[in-house]
Image (tube, rainbow, N blue to C red):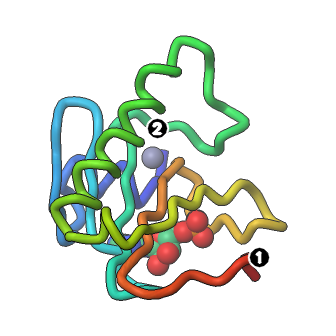
């Protein structure tokens, strides 16, 4: 299977990896939309949120914990940040390996575009 985020997780493709553990990897988005724009992914390939199984609940929860740690490390925890997970065409998903966008360092608008 050809998946850029699997390749990044396996370090076959370079990325600015800022966090790694047994189950998750986080790296800088190549086209940042905010001063802080980090992607948090599971090492396991899951194409979209629609493909998350019940036995992956802990893994998905772990992605939020990783985002929590990185938000603190980046110093955006107090002011705040946004976590985004796009699913399929209308949301603009372009990489079909689930990822949390961690966005911060500027005021976020609501509703999102
Ligand atoms: P989405 O539209 O939610 O699927 O977001 C995919 C994100 O992955 C976009 O913000 C891209 O800028 C980012 N992206 C795509 N390829 C890479 C890469 N090789 N390294 C880092 N970020 C990437
Ligand atoms: Zn993948």
| Residue of label 1 | 111
| Residue 45, numbered circle | 2
Please determine whether, in this image, residue 16 is positioned above or below residue 84.
below
Please determine whether, in this image, residue 109 is positioned above or below residue 73.
below
Say which element carries label 1.
loop
Task: Tell me how far mark 1 sits from mark 2, CA to CA.
Answer: 30 Å
The residue located at (44%, 72%) in the rendering is 103
| Residue 19, numbered circle | none
Which image quarter: residue 49? top right
Residue 102 at x, y percent in the picture: 42, 64
Please determine whether, in this image, residue 27 is positioned above or below residue 49.
below
The residue located at (48%, 53%) in the rendering is 99
Name the one closer to the observer, 21 or 79: 79
Name the one closer to the observer, 81 or 42: 81
The residue located at (27%, 31%) in the rendering is 23
* Few, some or many residues within 10 Å of mark 2 (<14, 14–19, 20+): some
Say which element carries label 2.
loop
Of all residues shown, which one is farthest toward the right? Answer: 90
Residue 81 at x, y percent in the picture: 44, 68
Residue 111 at x, y percent in the picture: 77, 76
Assess mark 2: CB under 8 A from ligand 2? yes
Residue 112 at x, y percent in the picture: 72, 77
Of all residues shown, which one is farthest toward the front? Answer: 78
């Amino acid at each position: 299977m050809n998946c850029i985020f699997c390749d990044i997780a396996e370090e076959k493709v370079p990325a600015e990896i800022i966090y790694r553990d047994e189950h998750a990897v986080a790296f800088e988005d190549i086209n940042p939309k905010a001063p802080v724009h980090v992607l948090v992914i599971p090492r396991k390939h899951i194409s979209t949120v629609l493909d998350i199984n019940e036995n992956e609940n802990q893994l998905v929860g772990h992605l939020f914990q990783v985002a929590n740690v990185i938000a603190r490390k980046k110093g955006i925890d107090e002011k705040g940040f946004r976590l985004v997970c796009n699913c399929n065409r209308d949301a603009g998903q372009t990489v079909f390996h689930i990822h949390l966008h961690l966005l911060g360092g500027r005021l976020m608008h609501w509703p999102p575009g």
